[in-house]
Image: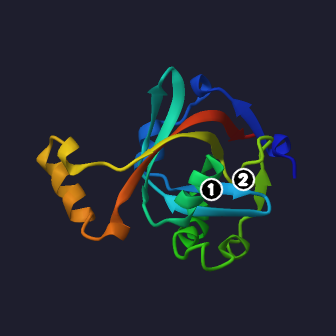
Amino acid sequence: MDINQLFKKISAEDMNDNVFTLVGNDFFAATAGKKDHYNSMVASGGGFGVLFKKPVSWCVFRSDRYTLEMIQKEQTYTLSYFPDDYREQMMFLGSKSGRDSDKMKEAELISIETPSQNMSFEKARLIFECKLMQITTPDPDDFYSQEARDYINETYKKSSDHRKFVIGEITDIWIKK
């Protein structure tokens, strides 16, 4: 199905969603790749704002995630938010790696391609298309609150636990019609 039949493109200024609810309460799927091969993972947290006069999102990924590897390769990705009744499908996206399985065929979600050839899902209610700007690894010494330092030090016990901050320019926003 064509994305324009299900979604309408809006500007960042036309967003009605509360960004604190989006990043603090809602799960979303981060997806990278093209129609012939893509991967999604469930995510939470992050933020939205303006950087270098561009609307941006930032997310936190474990350094060993396959989706992160695909974001680095493609340099584009989507963040897709779903209605609450899709929580089970969302949790499935976080239950196994697409590196070792054909998880996307098992996910029980119908994919949809954007005009930019990024992948998302027909049942999403909100889609952000992003162009990769930066991936960075936070250094515990760069945090000034003890709570943040303790969290980073506790989280980074093994190298596979390291987190990467992914910052992307929001190039398009699609909202369900």
Q: On screen, 16 above or below 163?
A: above
Q: Residue at x 62, y 56 (%)?
A: 31
Q: Which labelled disc corresponds to residue 119?
A: 2
160 left or right of 120 in image? left
Label ID, residue 31 = 1
Asked whether 13 or 74 is in front, the reply is 74
Q: Residue furthest front?
A: 73
Residue 126 image point, x, y percent: 64, 44
Residue 164, position in %: x, y? 40, 53
Residue located 67% across and 34% down the image? 172
**Crowd around label 1: few <14 · some 14–19 · many ≥20 (10 Å):** many
Residue 27 in percent (x, y) is at 50, 56
Proximity of marks 2 and 1: CB atoms separated by less than 8 Å: yes
Extreme residue toward the top, this view = 53
The dot on residue 168 is: none
Where 158 falls versus 133 (above or below)? Answer: below
Q: Is residue 80 above or below residue 9?
A: below
